[in-house]
Image (cartoon, rainbow, N blue to C red):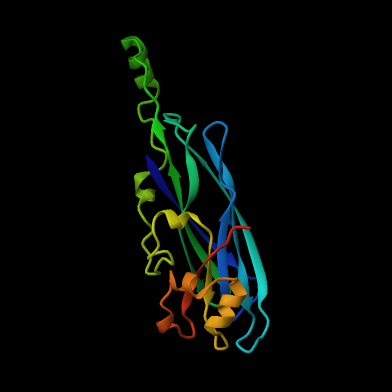
Amino acid sequence: MKKLIPFQKDLNFDKKIYEISSISLEHTLKPKENNQISGEFIISGTYKLTEASMNLDPFEYKLPFNISIDNKYDTKNIEVDINDFYYEFTNNEILSVNIEVVIDGLEEKEEKEMPKETQIEETKEKPHEEREIINEENITETKKETKSIFENLDENERYAVYKVHIVTENDTIDNIMQKYQITKEELENYNDLNDMQIGSKLIIQGHEN
């Protein structure tokens, strides 16, 4: 069983900047004791301070994440990863990130039969006990006009780390390939290079260290 959990956060830069040049997402989410999942999202990338700026300045934000899973689920074999990630940059100072966490491998524990007297007593004590891991209303995908940068990727590929490169005036295919140490074939896997123009967002697959 899979559960999708949305996470949204507005990140404020301490000064106005011209544009986000690249952005990537990593995480340290892991199952913990007592049916907890916790860790951090690590949002990092580069930005240009002004349109004429030749330098790319780095930024990094670490966002804590913690949820509790209902005790009716067996969490011994669960896997936690990122299912989707997209962002908006507004007013030259606010970076709104939207992350969709996937929890895979959830299994409901087998319920042992209890004496009728015990069942009746438990019902009296907890008539409205919440059993679900998360309210179903929150599981549905966040409705935003912004397109997901992972729209054309396969489901399994979404669990890797990707960077988003925003094409600038001085960019060429060759210097983008050199910057990210990738081949043209790897770049074409996720991007239409024939339609590349200033402001285009290119998906760059991260390489394992």
Give me the residue at 39% from left, 55% from top: 155
In which quadrant of the rendered view does residue 180 lie? bottom right
In which quadrant of the rendered view does residue 17 lie? bottom right
Q: Is residue 145 left or right of residue 51?
A: left
Q: Is residue 190 visible?
A: no
Give me the residue at 43% from left, 42% from top: 104
The spot of residue 11 in percent (x, y) is 58, 65
Quadrant where the image shows the N terminus: top left
Picture layout, residue 80 above or below residue 157: above
The spot of residue 31 in percent (x, y) is 54, 39
Give me the residue at 61% from left, 68% from top: 45
Q: Residue furthest left?
A: 116
The spot of residue 137 in percent (x, y) is 35, 49
Give me the residue at 41% from left, 42% from top: 134
Quadrant where the image shows the C terminus: bottom right
Foreground residue, 185 or 107? 185
Foreground residue, 148 or 125? 148
Q: Is residue 73 visible?
A: yes
How many marks the image carries: the answer is 0
Picture layout, residue 192 above or below residue 148: below
The spot of residue 23 in percent (x, y) is 56, 68
Foreground residue, 92 or 20? 20
